[in-house]
Image: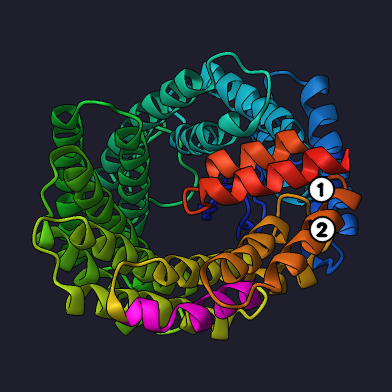
Amino acid sequence: MKKNEEFFEGEAINQYCQHTNHLLTDITPGTIEAVQYEEKGEQQESTEQAREYYEKAGEMYSKAHKMDDSDVDSLYNWARVLFLLMDYVPRHAPSEERLNLLDKSIDRFRKVLKLQPNNADALFNLAQGLVVRADLVEDVDGIEDAHGEAAQALQEAVSLYESAYELQERLRAHHGSDNSTIAICKAPVTALTLVETLTSLVDATKSLGEMLDQFEDIELLYKAAMGKLSLAYGILADANEPDDDTEITVHLYLAHASLLTTLADRTYTDTGKVDEKTYETAIETLAKVLALDPRNVEAHCDLGDLFGSYAQALLNSSTPDEKKIWELYTEATRNFQTALEYEPDNCNTLYKLGDIHFTRAQLPLPIARKQKTQLLKSAEHWYKYIVDLDANDIEGGWLPWAMSAWGLGTWTDHKEKLTEAEGVIKMWLEIGGTLDLLKEIGQDNVIMPDDFVIWASSLVTNSE
């Protein structure tokens, strides 16, 4: 997210924003105190202490704005701190708590734009908030048309990013002159600023495309996104600024690969055709990321997902190449393992490792049948590791752990594993698991077999 005087990035919810110094236009005692609280928050190792300081900073920005409702800087920074606070909501807290903070942040960014319609930073950050809202709103119970709200948020975000880019481009073209009548963007607009906005625009467009039903509409939307990517690559190639462009180049490659992967997946899903060229181009693009940043966990995980979806498409094709399919699944596993080496306690990667082993164990291939027992044991190991990291998360590793033990007891000679699976289900019930939650997780988890859900549901029913 961008502070009102300086640009800095935020990968949205679940990742902390990078912090820069505050350079407020109108310094007041209230804003000075707010800045001090923010700086203390940045320095805290304790999440709870950091959250308290950010809350105090938000209160100070709020008071400063109430004293002078034309104080755009305080209003802007108040919105930004509310957005930051989402990352400090406890992980097991209801999604409504994050959504409440986000909606307050969005509301204040809208108020900034009423006061300053040409504030490019506010346009960018409002778009970012709407992208997060599109993802978050579908996790909140009780929203009648969550899917529709998500699509609407993404449509507006795409439009806002486009407006922000247009203003930034004009500001950069008039560098050195009085830009106050053109747009408001307190930090100098560089080539990297433009590329970051285009990258965010492409990501939002990709997410919007994933919500569309008609493949023709998706193709048109993604064609426009490819045009934005070409524009971004051109800006980077022509840039003659001293800034290090490695980080933004990595983001651009990641966005490009993600768009290609989504397009290839939808091409197969909607037409039945395997677009090998697009899959291969996505692989090459992620390889460029790793050439720049070999320890990039996101790239390794994206590459693992890509190899897996490519393999699945080939598996379901009319002429499956069993050797290539197995090689792709092996590469997927290797990339997840590499990602875990760099971040050993990353639960997202642990889930991916468990899922890829569980998936490979069920493949209709001779080599998969031969390795079924070991693959299921590996899946069980990774799922149990998640439970070891957080045994109180009822939506975490418990049911996948039980699923892998059930698989061993059902699909191999290790019938004793069914007893272990029963024990895992009972422990899960003791920490708050319910039949409704089991059915919900079973519906959302695409690799969880229906037979397991039926078996586990019977156990839960008999335990009530």
- Horizontal side of 456 relative to 297 (left or right) equals right
Q: Is residue 324 above or below residue 230?
A: below
Crowd around label 1: few <14 · some 14–19 · many ≥20 (10 Å): many
Residue 28 screen position, x and y as percent: 81, 38
Above-or-below relation of 209 to 41: above
Stretch of the chain drawn in magenta: 367-382
Q: Which residue is mark 2?
A: 41
In the picture, the quarter occupied by the C terminus is top right
Question: Is residue 209 left or right of 433 when viewed as pictured?
Answer: left
Question: Mostly what secondary structure, the magenta segment?
Answer: helix
Marks 1,2: beta carbons within 8 A: yes
Q: Quadrant of residue 50?
A: bottom right
Q: Amino acid at mark 1?
A: Tyr
Of residues 217 and 31, the one drawn nearer to the viewer in this rendering = 217
Q: Is residue 371 part of the magenta span, yes or no?
A: yes
Q: Dot 2 lies on which element?
A: helix
Do we see residue 155 in this rendering? Answer: yes
Give x and y (percent) for residue 266. Answer: 23, 43
* Residue 1 visible in this rendered orientation of the protein: no
The numbered disc on residue 54 is 1
Q: Write down the quadrant of residue 305 in the picture.
A: bottom left
